[in-house]
Amino acid sequence: MRKLIMWNVMTLDGYFEGTQNWDLAFHSAIWGEELEKLSIEQLQSADYLVFGRVTYEGMAAYWTSGAENSEQEVAQLMNSIPKLVFSKTLKSSDWNNTTIISENAAEEMLKLKEQGGKDMFVFGSANLSETFIAHHLFDEYRIGVAPVLLGNGRPLFRQGIAPNNLSLVSTQQLSTGGVILKYAKNKAG
């Protein structure tokens, strides 16, 4: 069975973006060689990148035209790996290797997991992630914690999400002061 993995960066006080969409300035506090290496390893282990519409549109705009020279290996992988975008409103896509899924996100994801293969990563995509959390579809949560107190913004995990008991897989301290936490779904859950 394929694994579905959440990958997100959040602040120490739990926000994955500021008060506006794409308010991600705090990402610079955690980014460095170690996180770039992890990003490349994760992308190389992926069959699919999974997005909700808002994240998809921002990622497509950035990785198809705005990537910095230092990110070229990541950009090449982001552009070549097949992408799934879950959206009821998006009708077409210009980002190569994209499939739009407009109905039954949880059911479709379960079918994809059952096919087997390499990992699938959900980046950002808070609303879609909430759906997958509610249906206990994530096999692993990989969270980069930036050494920043933002004070306000959009929390990564909203109040009222489905309870989930997790097991710590690993921690990795970064030279930037950030930490990568990896948690897996308990076998019983």
Image (cartoon, rainbow, N blue to C red):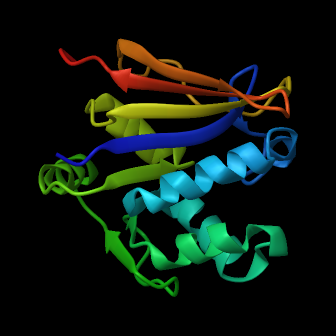
**Which residue is more in the foreground, 174 or 3?**
174
Q: Position of residue 52 (x, y in %)?
A: 47, 57
Name the residue nearer the viewer: 124 or 92: 124
Residue 20 placement (x, y as % from top left): 77, 48
Q: Position of residue 72 (x, y in %)?
A: 71, 74
Q: State whether residue 187 is above or below residue 42.
A: above
Quarter placement of the N terminus: top left
Q: Residue at x 53, y 19 (%)?
A: 159
Residue positioned 40% across, 59% down in the render: 46
Judged left or right of residue 16, residue 102 is left
Count the marks: how many? 0
User: Taking 98 as reference, is 26 above or below it?
Assistant: above
Picture coordinates of residue 171, whole percent (x, y): 59, 22
Q: Which of these two is toward me, 101 or 168?
A: 168
Looking at the image, can residue 86 be seen?
no
Q: Quadrant of residue 118?
A: bottom left
Q: Is residue 72 left or right of residue 126?
A: right
Q: Is residue 140 in view?
A: yes
Q: Is residue 75 above or below residue 189?
A: below
> Residue at 71% of width from left, 72% of height from top?
62
Question: Which quadrant is the C terminus positioned in?
Answer: top left
On screen, residue 22 above or below 175: below
